[in-house]
Image (tube, rainbow, N blue to C red):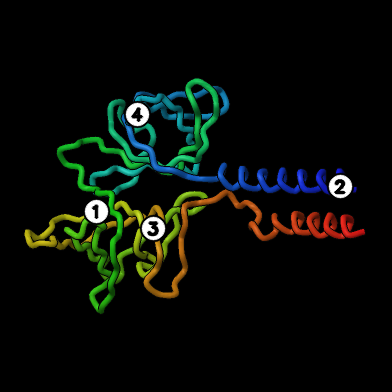
């Protein structure tokens, strides 16, 4: 009976590890580097890049992949992305074990002309709201960026982007923001013209939270039910 209980426990742990692996495999992460070319392998179209750490990767593109020009935050086509352009992108990880490694490309923000790029990565340190809009102070505390009332805010979804309320942004959120000018005060102040939400952080109020996209995996509680059943059965057999 002890051997049977041990086997049940081992199976339970194996299922638990499988759930953990499944959850980890659906993560989207940010990468940066330089575009080195584009191509196709007969099945997929890809954009080849050299990451900041020197690794060469092929990022698979589909109809939901978005390319955004860092200047003004305007959409652009894959055909308009030049070799040599620097980028910041979100890709699905882990990547394949092939050489070069491959991963799905969700969104790429491309810096075509570094002299005119005006998009900025922004990590939120604190949030406040008033009649003029939502005010975001960055983690360094040297810039207050205001999302004016009526400005459309877009956040990462499973495919593409979706519109969300500015009030869904909280402390720790990671954004890409655009603005025309900032004051010379300390902290500087700027009114945003475009906002992309990568992760929404902890909202300041009870508002919907937008997370890094998943792939529609079953909820963890549903995956945990079979584990609970196995443990109860094993316990009863052991008592018997």
Is disc 3 in contact with disc 1, using a CB cutoff of under 8 Å?
Answer: no
Q: Which residue is mark 3?
A: 154
Spot occupied by residue 61 in the image (x, y as percentages of width and height): 48, 35
Q: Residue at x 77, y 44 (%)?
A: 11
Front disc: 3 or 4: 4
Numbered disc 4: secondary structure: loop
How many residues crowd around disc 2 within 10 Å: few (fewer than 14), some, or many (20 or more)?
few
Please tell me in which quadrant of the rendered image residue 82 appears: top left
Q: How far apart are the two marked residues, 3 and 2, measured between alpha carbons?
A: 56 Å
Is disc 1 in contact with disc 2, using a CB cutoff of under 8 Å?
Answer: no
Please tell me in which quadrant of the rendered image residue 166 appears: bottom left
**Front position in the image: 42 or 111:** 111
Numbered disc 1: secondary structure: strand
Pick whichever of labels 1 and 2 is earlier in the sequence.
2
Pick whichever of labels 3 and 4 is earlier in the sequence.
4
Is disc 1 in contact with disc 4, using a CB cutoff of under 8 Å?
Answer: no
Pick whichever of labels 2 and 4 is earlier in the sequence.
2
Q: 205 above or below 237?
A: below
Q: How far apart are the two marked residues, 3 and 4, measured between alpha carbons?
A: 29 Å
Q: Residue at x 50, y 40 (%)?
A: 92
Q: Which residue is mark 2?
A: 2
Spot occupied by residue 72 in the image (x, y as percentages of width and height): 24, 49
Q: How far apart are the two marked residues, 1 and 4, measured between alpha carbons?
A: 27 Å
Of all residues, the one furthest to the right in this rendering is 240
Spot occupied by residue 97 in the image (x, y as percentages of width and height): 55, 26
Numbered disc 3: secondary structure: strand
**Front position in the image: 141 or 210:** 141
Q: Residue at x 20, y 60 (%)?
A: 141
Front disc: 1 or 2: 2
Q: Which mark is residue 53?
A: 4
């Amino acid at each position: 009976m002890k051997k049977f209980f041990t086997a049940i426990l081992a199976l339970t742990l194996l299922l638990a590890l499988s759930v953990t692996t499944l959850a980890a495999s659906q993560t989207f992460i940010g990468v940066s580097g330089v575009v080195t070319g584009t191509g196709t392998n007969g099945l997929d179209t890809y954009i080849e890049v050299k990451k900041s750490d020197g690794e060469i990767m092929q990022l698979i593109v589909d109809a939901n992949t978005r390319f955004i020009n860092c200047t003004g935050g305007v959409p652009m086509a894959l055909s308009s992305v030049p070799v040599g352009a620097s980028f910041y992108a979100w890709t699905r990880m882990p990547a394949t074990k092939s050489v070069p490694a491959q991963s799905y490309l969700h969104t790429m923000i491309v810096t075509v002309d570094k002299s005119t790029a005006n998009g900025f990565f922004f990590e939120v340190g604190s949030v406040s709201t008033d009649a003029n809009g939502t005010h975001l102070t960055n983690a360094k505390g040297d810039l207050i960026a205001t999302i004016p009332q009526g400005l459309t805010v877009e956040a990462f979804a499973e495919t593409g982007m979706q519109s969300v309320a500015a009030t869904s942004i909280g402390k720790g959120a990671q954004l890409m923001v655009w603005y025309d000018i900032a004051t010379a005060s300390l902290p500087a102040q700027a009114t945003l013209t475009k906002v992309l939400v990568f992760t929404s952080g902890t909202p300041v109020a009870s508002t919907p939270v937008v997370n890094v996209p998943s792939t529609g995996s079953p909820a963890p509680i549903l995956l945990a039910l079979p584990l609970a059943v196995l443990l109860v059965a094993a316990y009863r057999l052991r008592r018997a």
